[in-house]
Amino acid sequence: MDFKLLDLGRLRPGRLAVPPVFDGPSQVRAYWEALRIGGALPDRAQMDPRGLGGVLDRVFLAERIARGLVQVRIAGSGLAELAGMDLRGLPLSCLFTAEARPQLAETLEAVAQGQALAELDLAMDAGPGQVVARLLLLPLCDGADRRLVLGCLGTNGNLPTGKFRILSRQEERLELPVAPPAPQLVAQPPLRQRPHLTLVHARD
């Protein structure tokens, strides 16, 4: 029997299904990668909204406020429409079911600490369990001490009202450059003071 590849596809529907493609996350990651000078994490001051043109409505910026918990500081209009409210000032976990929050917290902590970047495939809690969105999470610096999370939520159309479940998550560990050690101050021995010279008049 001489079956062609297309025939096999017809005989076994679903086996050759094309994975969903989500606009936004790939563009945001490419921009983030371009800002990594010497492999270091990008700083918020480097961010230019023009570099995210076309996907800004799906982008958010969140700050770590506790272990595994981030608070949204800036959110695109598309995310507000999806949530049905302004997300600024709210924890990102408000978009997720209670069962999904421990996994989300574990991933957020790794990202906020600059240890990894992550992608989460999401489904709706009331849906059939299909992937309907992809969440990209990237670490970002804000000065020397403050750590932020840059995120992008890509969807494949209008989503029903509800909260997200996590179907799968992928974390990519980051190898950051090691800062050179601070120079050690070597104690210098005290300078030996030269004795003052005294002019002596010799008399015959």
Image (spheres, helix red, strand yellow):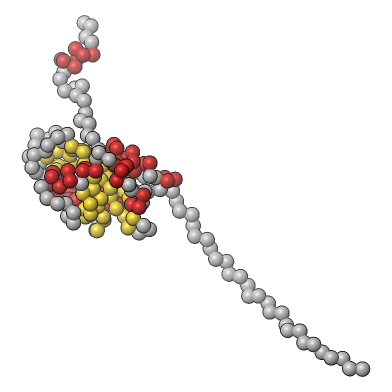
* Number of numbered discs on residues: 0
In the rendered view, does 199 fall on the left or right side of 184? right
| Near-viewer residue (79 or 113) | 79
Q: Quadrant of residue 22?
A: top left
Q: Position of residue 24 (x, y in %)?
A: 25, 38
Q: Quadrant of residue 198?
A: bottom right
The C terminus: image quadrant: bottom right
In the rendered view, does 193 fall on the left or right side of 200? left
| Near-viewer residue (169 or 46) | 46
Q: Residue at (15%, 47%) from the top-left corner?
A: 80
In the rendered view, does 132 fall on the left or right side of 181? left
The furthest residue to the front: 50
Q: Residue at (42%, 46%) from the top-left corner?
A: 37
Q: Is residue 55 above or below residue 75?
A: above
Q: Residue at (32%, 47%) from the top-left corner?
A: 48
Tell me if residue 103 can be seen. no
In the rendered view, does 187 fall on the left or right side of 77? right
Q: Position of residue 203 (x, y in %)?
A: 89, 94
The N terminus: image quadrant: top left
| Near-viewer residue (195 or 166) | 195
Q: Position of residue 121 (x, y in %)?
A: 20, 38
The furthest residue to the bottom: 204
The furthest residue to the right: 204
Tell me if residue 109 can be seen. yes
Q: Position of residue 92 (x, y in %)?
A: 19, 50
Q: Residue at (21%, 53%) from the top-left corner?
A: 72
